Image (cartoon, rainbow, N blue to C red):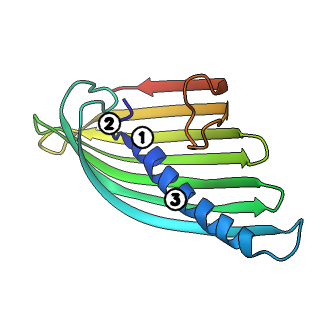
C-alpha cells in the first residue's frame, strides 16, 4: 500500500520530504555552530497540490477514484549539537474524490506528527494522529452521508542503515489503530 497515495500516505510522503529538507538544513546549521551544547531551532511550511488515481479510498476500496487536493504542512524542528533531532507539526489535506459513477466526496484530513532521532544511537521514533472527515455526495449534489477516519500510529526503530525508514529487523515497537465509519 506504500505506492498508493491516500490522504494518510500522501501526508506521510509530504512529511518525509519536509523532514529531509529540515534535517539537511539543521545539519548544515549545526556544522556551522561554533559552540557545543547549543540548539538550532527552525520552522517549515509548505503547500503542495496533488492529483492521483487511487483504489483505496475509505469505504470504496478497490474502486478507482480521482483524488485532487492540497497538502499544507507546517511545524518546527530542533537540532542539538549532541546529535538529537526532533520535528513536530501538522499536515492539513483538503481534497475532492471523484468516483466513476458520478458520486464525489469533499474532505479534510488533519494529521499531527512527531519525529525524533538520536544520531549517537540509531534510535528513531515517529508518532502521528489523524482525523479525517468527508461528506459523500450523489452525482446530483445531494448529500449521502459522512465518512470519518481516525488513525493513531507509533513506531520506534533502530535505524541501522540510516535511511530514516523502519526496515524489517529494525523495529522495536509499532502499532497502528484505525477507526473508519461509512455512510
* Residue 4, x across and y down, in percent: 32, 36
| Element carrying mark 2 | loop
Instruction: Give the Cα distance between marks 1 and 2.
Output: 7 Å
Q: Please tell me in which quadrant of the rendered image residue 171 appears.
A: top right
- Does 39 sit above or below residue 160? below
Q: Residue at x 68, y 61 (%)?
A: 77
Q: Residues within 10 Å of mark 2 (few under 14, many from 20)?
A: some
Q: Which mark is residue 18?
A: 3
Give the structural element (helix, strand or loop) at label 3.
helix
The 10 Å Cα crowd at callout 1, few under 14, some 14 to 19, many 20 or more, is some
Residue 9 is labelled as: 1
Q: Is residue 64 left or right of residue 119?
A: left
Q: Counting other residues with Cα less than 10 Å from the Cα at mark 3, is it few (<14), some (14-19), or many (20 or more)?
A: some
Name which residue lies at 19% across and 28% down.
Answer: 63
Q: Using the numbered discs, state the Cα–Cα distance from disc 1 to disc 3 in whole angstroms.
A: 14 Å
Identify the residue under disc 2: 4
Using the image, determine if residue 55 lies above or below residue 163. above
Vertical relation: 4 (above or below) 52:
above
122 in relation to 18, above or below: above
Between disc 3 and disc 2, whose residue precedes? 2
Nearer-N-terminus badge (1/2): 2
Position of residue 93 in the picture relative to residue 127 (left or right)? left
> Which residue: 65% across, 35% down?
160
Report the side of 23 relative to 132 (left or right).
Answer: right
| Between 157 and 160, the one nearer to me in the picture | 160
Which is nearer the N-term, disc 1 or disc 3? 1
Instruction: Name the quadrant of the N terminus.
Output: top left
Residue 11, given in percent of the width and then of the height, sits at 45, 47
Amino acid at each position: 500500500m506504500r505506492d498508493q497515495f491516500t490522504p494518510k500516505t500522501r501526508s506521510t510522503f509530504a512529511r518525509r520530504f519536509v523532514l529531509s529538507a529540515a534535517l539537511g538544513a539543521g545539519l548544515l546549521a549545526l556544522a556551522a555552530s561554533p559552540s557545543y551544547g547549543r540548539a538550532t531551532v527552525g520552522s517549515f511550511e509548505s503547500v503542495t497540490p496533488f492529483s492521483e488515481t487511487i483504489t483505496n479510498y475509505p469505504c470504496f476500496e478497490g474502486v478507482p477514484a480521482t483524488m485532487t487536493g492540497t497538502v499544507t504542512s507546517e511545524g518546527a524542528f530542533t537540532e542539538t549539537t549532541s546529535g538529537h533531532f526532533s520535528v513536530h507539526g501538522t499536515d492539513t489535506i483538503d481534497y475532492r474524490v471523484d468516483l466513476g459513477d458520478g458520486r464525489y466526496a469533499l474532505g479534510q484530513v488533519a494529521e499531527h506528527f512527531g519525529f525524533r532521532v538520536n544520531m549517537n544511537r540509531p534510535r528513531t521514533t515517529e508518532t502521528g494522529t489523524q482525523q479525517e472527515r468527508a461528506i459523500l455526495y450523489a452525482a446530483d449534489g445531494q448529500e449521502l452521508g459522512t465518512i470519518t477516519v481516525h488513525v493513531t500510529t507509533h513506531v520506534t526503530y533502530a535505524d541501522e542503515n540510516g535511511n530514516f525508514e523502519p526496515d524489517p529487523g529494525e523495529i522495536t515497537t509499532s502499532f497502528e489503530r484505525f477507526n473508519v465509519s461509512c455512510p
